[in-house]
Amino acid sequence: MVTNEQMESFSDLDYTLYQYVTSHAEKVIYMRIRDLANETHVSPTTILRFCRKVDCDGFSEFKTKLKMHITQEQPLSLTSPEHAFREFIDQTLQIDYERQIKQIASVIAQTEHVIFLGNGSSGILAEYGSRYFSSLKKFSLHIKDPYFPIFGQYMKSSVSIILSVSGESEQTIEQSRRLREEGSTLISITNSKSCRLAKMSDYNLAYYSNMEFVEKANITSQLPVVYLLERLAKETYSSMHTE
C-alpha cells in the first residue's frame, strides 16, 4: 500500500513507523493514534505526517486503507489444476481442434527449424517446448532476449511458436511482428482467439482456461499449454516420418 515514490520522502522515523505497521498490521488497524505513538516511540504529529506522505488525510483513513490491503492479501479460492485441465479437454479437444493440431504439425514438419518465443511463465514453457521438439529430432531454439536481432534468410524457412496467455504483451507482439516481417510462419498458443497475437498469426491454438490473478501475477493454468506443446511435437515427429 506504499509506493516506491512515497518511500523516497520517508525520514528515519517514517521508516520506523513503516516497519512496525507492516509487521503488526492486524494490530494497528484497531489502535488509536496515541497507542501507535507509544508503541513506536514517536509523536502523534509524526504519525500524521507519515499518513499524509502515503496519501491519507489522517490516521483513520490510513487504518481503513490498511484494512483493505490486509483483506486483499487473504487467500483466494483458486481453480484446481485438475478442473482447469478437465475443462480444457471437454471444451476444446473436439474433432475440428484435433484436425487443426495435425495440420499445424504438418507445417512444422516441413520447415527447417522452429523458433520458440514467450515471456514470463510463457518464456519458461517456450524453453521447455524448444528442448522437447529438439529431443524429437526437430531443431528448435528459444529466444529469451527481447532485443535478439531477428533478421536473415534463415527466417524464411522457419516456424515461430509463440506462447502468451493474454496475447497482448507489447514485447511479445513486437517480437512476433519482426519474425513475421522476416518471413517466419507464426503459430501462437494463447488463451483466446480474440487477442492481437492470435489475429496476426498464421495459425492459432486457443485453450480458454479460466483467467486467474493474485494481485498482478497471472497464475492462469499452463497445463493446456504443456499438453499442446507435447502433442504438437509428437505429431510433428510422426509427420516427419510419414511424408
Image (spheres, rainbow, N blue to C red):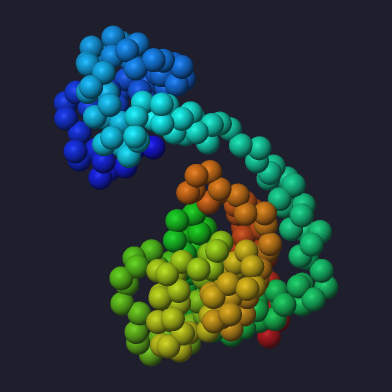
Q: What residue is shown at x 20% (from left), y 33% (from top)?
A: 10
Front residue of 143/26: it is: 26
Q: Tell me residue 23's x, y (percent).
A: 37, 21
- Comparing 141 with 36, the one in front is 36
**Where does the C terminus fall, quadrant-wise?**
bottom right
Give the residue at x 50% y 33%: 68
Q: Is residue 225 visible?
A: yes
Q: Is residue 149 above or below residue 24?
A: below
Any part of residue 230 in sight: no
State the count of labels: 0
Quadrant of the rendered image containing residue 211: bottom right
Q: Quadrant of residue 97?
A: bottom right
Q: Residue at x 76, y 65 (%)?
A: 92
Q: Is residue 219 left or right of residue 157?
A: right
Query: Which residue is farthest front?
Result: 57
- Quarter assignment of residue 42: top left
Q: What x and y, as percent, mark residue 232? A: 65, 69
